[in-house]
Image: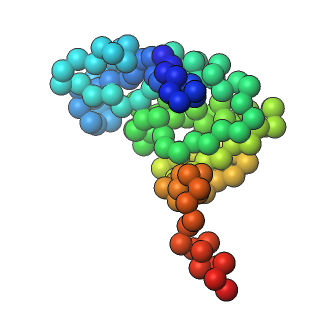
Amino acid sequence: LSQNLLGKEILLPSDIVIADKFAADAETKVVSSDAIPDGWMGLDNGPASTAEQKEFLSDCQTVIMNGPMGVFEMKAFEKGTFGLVDILADLSKEKGAITIIGGGDSVAATELSGRAGDMSHISTGGGASLELLEGKVLPGVAALNDK
């Protein structure tokens, strides 16, 4: 699924890994993103979504990841996040793309995946990174400019 907003295409998950509870031993299913039953919760991208992400990003020269796809800390819900990390690492390593990982959870997932060394840049400043991209002046940078 993709949406075109302000002339920019945004890829949305087409399938979701759902669970009947927020727990490592939850019952899980993969369903269409518009078919999550009452009482269930979406906790990861599904495999079709990961394949779509790979295709969608295949010709990108710069990609910023700011947040995991799912609850990667639980084995049942790690595939979407680690799949995206692999996609980005491969883009960087094989195609020379600039891959920027921003935010503590994204950094943790990238480190846990073993692919951190394949990324161009890693920063725990997720919110600050987004503010910088918005054009905002960051307080720490402003303080340096005052000196």
Q: Residue at x 62, y 72 (%)?
A: 141
Apparent side of residue 133 relative to residue 127 in the rendered image (left or right):
right
Residue 108 visible in the displayed image: no
The percent position of residue 92, horizontal first and vertical second, equals 75, 38
Q: Residue at x 64, y 83 (%)?
A: 146
Using the rendered view, name the quadrant where residue 54 is placed.
Answer: top right
Residue toward you, 129 or 7: 7
The percent position of residue 3, horizontal first and vertical second, equals 49, 21
The percent position of residue 100, horizontal first and vertical second, equals 65, 47
Q: How is the image coloured?
A: rainbow
Q: Residue furthest bottom?
A: 147
- Does 8 appear above or below 138? above
The percent position of residue 64, horizontal first and vertical second, equals 62, 42
Apparent side of residue 116 relative to residue 71 in the rendered image (left or right):
right
- Does 115 appear above or below 94? below
Using the rendered view, name the quadrant where residue 18 is placed.
Answer: top left
Q: Residue at x 65, y 79 (%)?
A: 144
Residue toward you, 26 or 39: 39
Q: Residue furthest left?
A: 39
Residue toward you, 113 or 84: 84
Tally of numbered discs: 0
Task: Report the quarter where the C terminus lies.
Answer: bottom right
Residue 35 visible in the displayed image: yes
